[in-house]
Image (cartoon, rainbow, N blue to C red):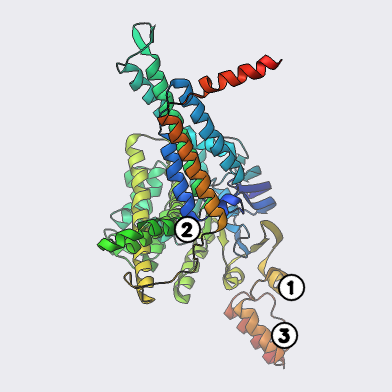
């Protein structure tokens, strides 16, 4: 079942001089099993929007429906823990949320909080650690002696171990080198293929093109466009000030130099290469 | 935690905001002294408290602070007030009293509790006026200025002012950080509000450890950044924002000192406004 926002608004510090309406009257549906990107400028309300999905922020007005859970403004939520377990959120720079003595203890922290026994939690932790590419030699190490990239993997494993139905990622590749970023995205792709709905907040349009099937464009706290990446990048996006993915920049340069071909639909370098090859063969 | 506006600086362009931080700090101390002066009898004390409260209200109105904010801050004081009342009532005292069941309650005890409570409210109000109208950095400049005479005995005034200003600067940053980590842990199923003691301790640990780590990391980064720019605490330095004494600051100084003088005279001369004013009121009433 999808995630639906109905007239959702959120105001920070209401009734103070610092009052600020971060999102206004949001109406959107995130399809079940989709890989959805939320893009937009800094301060456009992306993070505020995704935090509504697992009730970290409760809407000031409106309603958020996540499968069977209804989060209605000004109403107490009875099954808060279940909502949180249902939708796991990986914050920006999640490596700063680690605190346990060993990696496996930290990863099993989430499942244990959600009521799993120590044994089950540990099993889930080990599975999640393998998913993120950390083998058994890491289990007993302290998270604080790991490198930044490894720490981030541990933190992400901590969320994956909860086995959420919806995985929310807030800038998961920020500060990673291209290789690390690629490996991270491969991991999320794998999790998505298992049937998890993935919602990703990102500035990287290459990720949007390469992995996502739905894009929500936000501007000044409102949704300006809901579409798929291929349609989005086909049109001119100067008004939203979105970057063009490298793949399309390259393809456009080729077109300018005289290679006549239609590159829409290409999502990966391989697909683009095939299209270029076809165009070349025709000539 | 989320709506921590407790005396936070709120930028407005009011006469109070424009005052020099030094005079604002000085006035705060002077008015606080005035709060603690005792007068000849109980009604007189209350009249003077009322007067000071009226002044605070005027200051708050001038600096765009709503009365509501003051009461919001006082919410935390309720328990303390109750505690004070109980302690004071149980203490032996002198003067008139009445009995509740088997406890002897002295009127003096009640007055004393009321005095403390009123003084607290007045002090909170005054401090709030200062902190909401003055940038924390300006406050540290003022502190540094007042500490300047201590330089003679090699007291590290600049270092202390720098430490205070860095601490003040990082309060909002650390609060943001706390909020962020709390959210991250909440999404991992931590419940900071409910739960058994053991769970609560775990919840707090999951917050404190990352917070300390990031605080230490920040301080190290800041120290490196400062050193990279050649920071030397003992060097003579100029300032981007220079404090300037203006005419309005002199006016404020005269007003505040005049008020203190009036209060001291009233106290030392045992003036009683009720006794003083009765003949005048009688004369006015006599006209009708």
Please report, as a chain letter, where disc 1 is located.
Answer: A
Please report, as a chain letter, where disc 3 is located.
Answer: A
According to the picture, the residue beneath numbered tag 3 turns out to be: A261
For the residues carrying marks 3 and 2, which lies nearer the camera in this image? 2
What separation in Å lies between label 2 and label 1 (alpha carbons)?
A: 51 Å
The image shows residue B285 at horizontal and vertical percentages of 66, 16
Looking at the rendered structure, whether the residues under marks 3 and 2 are on a common chain is answered as: no
Q: Nearer the viewer, residue A184 or A276?
A: A184
| Numbered label attached to residue A235 | 1
Q: Report whether B274 appears left or right of A255.
A: left
Q: Report whether A163 appears left or right of B96.
A: right
Q: Is residue A174 above or below residue B71?
A: below
Q: Is residue B274 above or below residue A90?
A: above
According to the picture, the residue beneath numbered tag 2 turns out to be: B138
| Residue A214 appears in view | yes
Residue at the (37%, 71%) spot, across then down? B226
Residue at the (55%, 45%) spot, across then down? A55
Please report, as a chain letter, where disc 2 is located.
Answer: B
Q: Is residue A206 above or below residue B20?
A: below
């Amino acid at each position: 079942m999808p995630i639906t926002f109905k007239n959702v608004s959120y105001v920070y510090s209401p009734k103070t001089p610092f009052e600020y309406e971060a999102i206004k009257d949001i109406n959107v549906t995130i399809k079940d099993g989709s890989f959805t990107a939320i893009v937009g400028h800094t301060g456009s309300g992306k993070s505020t929007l995704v935090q509504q999905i697992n009730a970290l922020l409760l809407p000031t007005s409106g309603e958020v429906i996540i499968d069977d859970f209804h989060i209605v403004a000004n109403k107490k939520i009875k099954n808060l823990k279940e909502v949180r377990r249902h939708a796991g959120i990986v914050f920006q720079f999640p490596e700063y949320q680690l605190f346990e003595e060993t990696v496996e203890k930290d990863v099993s922290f989430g499942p244990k909080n959600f009521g799993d026994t120590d044994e089950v939690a540990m099993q889930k932790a080990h599975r999640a650690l393998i998913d993120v590419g950390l083998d058994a030699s890491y289990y007993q190490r302290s998270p604080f002696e790991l490198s930044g990239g490894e720490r981030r993997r541990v933190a992400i494993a901590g969320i994956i171990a909860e086995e959420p139905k919806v995985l929310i990622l807030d800038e998961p590749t920020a500060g990673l080198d291209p290789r690390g970023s690629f490996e991270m995205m491969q991991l999320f792709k794998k999790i998505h293929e298992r049937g998890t709905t993935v919602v990703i907040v990102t500035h990287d349009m290459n990720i949007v093109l390469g992995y996502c099937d739905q894009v929500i464009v936000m501007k000044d706290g409102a949704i300006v466009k809901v579409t798929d990446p291929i349609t989005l990048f086909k049109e001119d996006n100067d008004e939203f000030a979105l970057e063009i993915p490298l793949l399309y920049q390259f393809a456009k340069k080729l077109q300018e130099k005289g290679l006549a071909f239609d590159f829409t639909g290409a999502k990966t370098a391989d697909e683009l290469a095939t299209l270029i090859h076809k165009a070349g063969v025709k000539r | 935690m989320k709506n921590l506006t407790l005396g936070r600086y709120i930028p407005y362009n009011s006469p109070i905001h424009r005052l020099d931080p030094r005079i604002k700090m000085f006035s705060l101390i002077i008015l606080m002294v005035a709060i603690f002066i005792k007068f000849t009898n109980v009604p007189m004390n209350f009249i003077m408290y009322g007067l000071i409260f009226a002044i605070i209200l005027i200051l708050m109105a001038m600096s765009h602070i709503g009365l509501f904010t003051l009461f919001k801050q006082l919410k935390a004081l309720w328990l303390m007030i109750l505690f004070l009342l109980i302690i004071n009532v149980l203490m032996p005292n002198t003067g008139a009293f009445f009995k509740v069941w088997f406890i002897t309650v002295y009127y003096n005890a009640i007055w004393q509790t009321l005095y403390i409570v009123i003084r607290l409210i007045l002090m909170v109000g005054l401090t709030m006026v200062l902190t909401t109208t003055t940038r924390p950095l300006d406050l540290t400049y003022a502190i540094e200025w007042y500490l300047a005479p201590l330089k003679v005995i090699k007291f590290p005034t600049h270092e202390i002012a720098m430490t205070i200003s860095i601490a003040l600067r990082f309060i909002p940053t650390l609060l943001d950080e706390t909020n962020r980590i709390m959210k991250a842990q909440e999404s991992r199923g931590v419940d900071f509000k409910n739960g058994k003691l053991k769970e609560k301790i775990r919840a707090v640990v999951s917050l404190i450890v990352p917070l300390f780590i990031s605080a230490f990391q920040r301080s190290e980064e800041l120290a490196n950044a400062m050193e990279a720019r050649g920071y030397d605490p003992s060097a003579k330095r100029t300032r981007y924002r220079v404090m300037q004494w203006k005419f309005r600051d002199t006016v404020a100084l005269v007003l505040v000192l005049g008020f203190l003088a009036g209060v001291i005279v009233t106290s030392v001369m045992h003036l009683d406004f009720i006794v003083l004013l009765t003949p005048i009121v009688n004369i006015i009433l006599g006209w009708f």
